[in-house]
Amino acid sequence: MGRTKPRRKRAAPERDESSALLPAGGRPRASGLGVAAQFSGATAATVAASLIVFGLILYRILAGILSDEIDATGVQAVRALAAVDANCWEPFHETALEGKGAKARDEGGLGQVTLEKEQKAQYEKRSALNRRRLRELVEASGTKLLDVVILDAAMKKVINGDSAISFEQTTSRSFAEVLIQEGAYLANAGTDKQRRTQARIYAADVKDQDGKVAAKAVVALSAEKIGESLSRVLMSMLLLTFVFLGIGVLVSWLLAQRITRPIQQLAEDIETVAAGDLEHRTHAHSSDEVGVLARTFDRMTQSLLGLQDMQKQQAAQAHQIEVAREVQAALLPEKLPAVPGFECGAAARPAGKIAGDFYDVSDMAGGAKLVAVVSASGGGVPGAIVVTMARSLLKALAGAETSPAELLRRMNRLLAPDLRRGMYVSALLVRVEPAGGRLVVANAGHTPLLRVKVGAAAAEPFHGDGIALGFDKGPIFDRTIKDKELELPVGERVLLCTRALFDIKDASGKELGEAAAHRLFAQVAARAAGDFVNATLAAIEHHRAGTEAVDDVTFLTLRRGGGGTA
């Protein structure tokens, strides 16, 4: 990354308390361990931890393998010893000969004793040969044979062997009917030449011809091979750990230096931009993360160049929207004109600063009053513009018309050609006769007029047939829009509202719904117009329970029996 233009000379900044923390020249300096050192240390620690964990796992696996090997040798050896002795040891061991010899002397059968001694000598020769073969079998696996004895079934008296095995047991387990004991084998026990050797004892049953346990075959094997092998492995692992640790530190340090060099250059670029030189350019010469960061920072710098203009534009737009809101609010009547024979009340709650709805009371030809609620599709500025156009047409044309339906036809002919695709305006117009309770209703795709009879449990919709303004430029709209008459007795109320009033949602997303709204209107229908409006708004806010408004809510109500506006 490089800079394409020299830095500008800047006036020295005013000194504040934070400048005392900066070194000479005002440029902040890093303190503590640098990124390279931290990266190297983290890499070294990771390598060391990985090698240690790997070494421990390898150590345990190797220890298990060596243990299994010596156990396999010991089990094989003691089984071989037990199998041989099972067929030949019992008739010739010393205890049996002594007993038979005493019996022979008592009976005068010295010849029998001599015969048995010869057989014993032959057995001893075979026993020595078996022991030698056993030693060769054990030592062929690399394990040292320490001792071999045959004990009685209680393992207390030596039947065949030099002496009893001196052994200090630490652990004991069984495998394949062979008792395995771990501990220390004591050579020359009880003398000055006593020596301890880590060993394992393997004991197996020796059975006679009837399958009964007649003795125990015992083999002692040295376990020092395991310790020696594990010590060599441990030393090798330690050596490799230090070697790879050194290599890891060196490589990570070189890599960290390579990584931090462009970061340092980027830091200088950031310092230049932070000082106010927004025309400074930062170039990236790589496609890695640092290169992406450099390009991103350069785009940010270029974006900052237009930030002040953007802020001015946003401020101007906000001012224009505020002016539009004030203008639109001024279009709504501060006080509804009097409608002879009726109480009249209205309310508008826009979801945003600019609404897409309006209500009005205008004069029609013949002295009648026109009550209207109009809503444009969409919201925001487009909806406000369209609904303002509709209001202007309504106010300009209403004085020359006696029919709400004909008024809507004329409005559609003028408005539809100027609406883009997808935009439309719904309107509900009610002509109120100067005398009596006769209403003439025309509905152009709007929410139906709601009528609340005296004592009714819920409001009733009074449906119309028309489509919204803007959907069709003339023929279809003209055929569908019609006037409908409604006689409103004294005490009854009608309500003109937008669909959004029924779509208000609570915190769980549940809508208020038409049925609940109709019941609400009936409950407060007997109140004065102002109280009716306040009660309706309070019910809306209670259901909303603090959730954000999504659509504009606008409604106007008439109740026959009063003499003016509430």
Image (cartoon, rainbow, N blue to C red):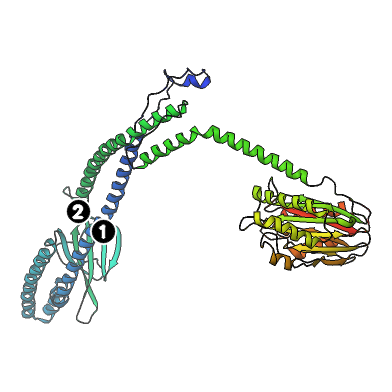
Q: Mark 2 points at which residue?
A: 224
Residue 124: x %, y % from top left? 8, 70
Q: How crowded is mark 1: few (under 14 residues within 10 Å), some or many (20 or more)?
A: few
Q: Which of 548 and 233 is in front in this view?
A: 548
Q: Nearer the viewer, residue 70 or 24?
A: 24
* Quarter of the rendering containing residue 436: bottom right
Q: Name the residue under label 1.
A: 64
Mark 2 residue element: helix
Q: How crowded is mark 2: few (under 14 residues within 10 Å), some or many (20 or more)?
A: some
Residue type, numbered disc 1: Gly
Is 98 positioned to the left or the right of 312 in the image?
left
Is 316 positioned to the left or the right of 535 in the image?
left
Residue at horizontal 66%, vertical 39%? 320
Residue type, numbered disc 2: Glu
Residue 196, visible in the rendered structure = no
Q: Nearer the viewer, residue 514 or 216?
A: 514
Residue 446: x %, y % from top left? 73, 61
